[in-house]
Image: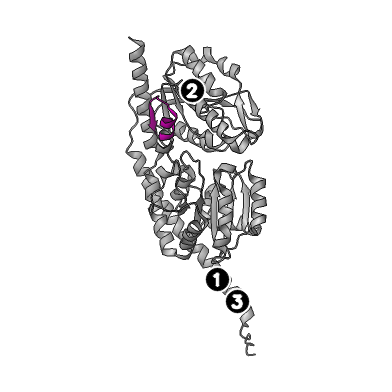
Amino acid sequence: MPQRRRPPLSDQEVAPLVKLANGNALTLQREADREARMTSALALFHSTASTHEIQPQSMKILMVSDVYFPRVNGVSTSIAGFRGALERMGHSVTLICPGYPVGQVDEPGVIRIRSRQVPGDPEDRMVYYRDLLALAPKLADEAFDLIHIHTPFTAHYAGIALGRRLGLPLVATYHTLFEEYLHHYIRWLPQRWLRLAARRLSVHQCQQVDALVAPSRAMQETLTRYGVTTHTQVIPTGLGLDTFCHPQGDSDFRAYYHLPQEARLLLYVGRAAFEKNIDFLIDMLPKVLTEHPTTRLIITGEGPAHDSLVRRAQDVGVADAVLFLGYLDRSGPLQAAYRAADVFVFASRTETQGLVLLEAMALGTPVVSTAMMGTLDVLKEGEGCLIAEENLDDFSAKVKRLLSDDALRRQLAERALTYAASWHEDAKSAELVALYRQLTADYQAKASK
């Protein structure tokens, strides 16, 4: 019997098949492009890392901090990055930091001590001063070369006391511009009072140490303007691409969060904090949606501004286009978010560096960002990014330009990989070791007089 021919598909039947085919083709092309860029990025980073030889004389470094993982923020990331790079270079690093009730992972070389919650801030903790000082006899046997302080709270004052007891030079990293933070959290006092108090406290603490590390030139200039006279060296936190090499890709991320393949994804990574200016990104979104209605703004991270941002999205009328994902694990899901994004967006006014900008670039995701404080050092127009003014029209115009121009987006992605490679963490750690060596030499010279 002759086979019965199937009648031709109707327009209504053809449309979803075409959409599916286009979506699959788009997914395959995105993943192929990103896989090629990742291969190039690995070669660039490994080439950069190999140029930094291990120092012939190892050092023993004691770091103290009121914050470390599982608390996710820039300070934790900076400490972990420098620790890892310094140890690969042959140095020994011991870190004293808070114990956390949930999510804590034991690591070699990390000493956890009792801590208490910071009043009004459920995420942060402070170590107990006496518990840290009680370690002095044990630490004296370790023959450390110096102490590196990372936070201005209990750990700072305990670190100062330890330095005096053990006869060690002290260096501190000024990670956070507190005059721009306090008024968001202590709203019942006048802002100018809080700024003045933050400046005076910063000067007092910075004058107590032998050397300072500033993550950016803008931060160094701020400390000079405050009246700090302690030697200050600019050493940004470096980037380790190896921590971003995970197989989860674009399609995995979109499928997990039920995001259509044709959706345009804007990504923000960081704390959901008032000073991060995330509400500006939400306010900007309607202007992008007029030309790219499938756009979604993905906000990762948690923090005190979360509820306020949810209300802001509702008030602006974009609640359906904003996704709050909370903290994403850096060992895979966060990298998948970076890779899936079409554009990384950022508008923080108070960054000491803005390491997330480099993380996005290292995964071939172009950036649209304002350039303020520490991000001034990181961002260079055309090197993986478009720099925008802090106004809705200019910022949204640059986002729309990237979403509309595939060739420009690919060009910026390629430049981003090369640029991010120049920020390899081994290079920045070598600068830190040079400071350590100079500091210990100067300290010994003074002691011998």
Q: Earlier in the sequence, mark 3 or mark 2?
A: 3
Identity of the residue furthest to the bottom in this view: 1
Residue closest to the eye, 107 or 240: 240
For residue 98, side relative to residue 204 (left or right): right
Residue where numbered disc 3 is placed: 15
Can you tell which of label 2 and label 1 is closer to the viewer? 2
What amino acid is found at the position of numbered circle 2 in the picture?
A: His
Magenta residues (range): 221-234
Mark 1 or mark 3, whichever is nearer to me:
3
- Residue type marked 3: Ala
Q: Percent position (x, y) of residue 68? A: 55, 32
Q: Please tell me which residue lies in front, 199 or 299.
A: 199
Left or right: residue 53 compared with residue 22: left
Contact check, label 2 and label 1, Cβ < 8 Å: no
Q: Nearer the observer, disc 3 or disc 2?
A: 2
Q: Is residue 378 toward the left or the right of residue 198 in the image?
A: left
